[in-house]
């Protein structure tokens, strides 16, 4: 079960990176590039964080990872013109920090 969750998380993470790369290299129309790199990317990363949360070895980080996932996903739907649009980046950074701090030493 855990191997399957790790595989799904890996697929979501790779798909998110592809979305980000598409936006950076402007492979499609500006609207599609924007959608992929500024919306779909954060939804996929949030999904990856949701799957990763129950697998964290430090159970103190589980709630934080769920919160980071929620902030990424909900932040993706906040209009860019809003002052709160940068909240999705905070969720991304929080999830990355929790993920890295959970690694075995």
Image (cartoon, grey):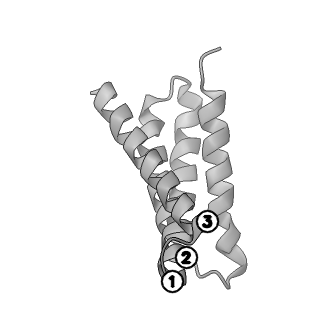
Expressed as whole percent of the image width and height from the top left, the position of residue 8 reads 34, 41
Q: Give the class, few, some or many, for how many residues have Cα within 10 Å of label 1's Cα (few <14, many ≥20).
A: few
Expressed as whole percent of the image width and height from the top left, the position of residue 87 reads 67, 65
Is 11 situated left or right of 65 in this image? left
Q: N-terminal of the two: label 2 or label 3?
A: 3
Between marks 2 and 3 in the image, the one whose residue lies nearer the viewer: 3
Mark 1 lies on residue: 31
Mark 2 lies on residue: 34
- Disc 3 to disc 1, how far (Cα)? 13 Å
Q: Give the class, few, some or many, for how many residues have Cα within 10 Å of label 2's Cα (few <14, many ≥20).
A: some
Q: 40 and 5: which one is in front? A: 40
The structure residue drawn at horizontal position 51% and vertical position 57%, both measured from the top left corner, is 70
Q: Secondary structure at mark 2?
A: helix
Q: 17 and 93: which one is in front? A: 17
Q: Are marks 1 and 2 in contact (CB under 8 Å)?
A: yes
Q: Secondary structure at mark 3?
A: helix
The structure residue drawn at horizontal position 40% and vertical position 41%, both measured from the top left corner, is 9
Q: Secondary structure at mark 1?
A: helix
| Picture quadrant of residue 54 | top left
Q: Which mark is residue 91?
A: none
Mark 3 lies on residue: 24
Q: Give the class, few, some or many, for how many residues have Cα within 10 Å of label 3's Cα (few <14, many ≥20).
A: few
Quarter of the image that includes the N terminus: top left
| Picture quadrant of residue 82 | bottom right
Is 18 situated left or right of 6 in this image? right
Quarter of the image that includes the C terminus: top right
Asked if residue 3 is positioned above or below residue 66 in the image, the reply reads: above
């Amino acid at each position: 079960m855990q191997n399957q969750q790790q595989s799904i998380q890996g697929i979501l993470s790779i798909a998110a990176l592809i979305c980000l790369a598409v936006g950076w290299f402007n492979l499609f129309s500006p609207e599609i590039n924007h959608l992929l790199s500024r919306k779909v990317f954060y939804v996929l990363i949030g999904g990856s964080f949701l799957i990763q949360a129950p697998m964290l070895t430090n159970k103190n980080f589980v709630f934080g990872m769920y919160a980071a996932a929620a902030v990424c996903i909900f932040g993706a739907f906040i209009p860019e013109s809003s002052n709160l649009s940068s909240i999705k980046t905070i969720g991304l950074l929080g999830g990355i920090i929790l993920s890295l701090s959970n690694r075995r030493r």
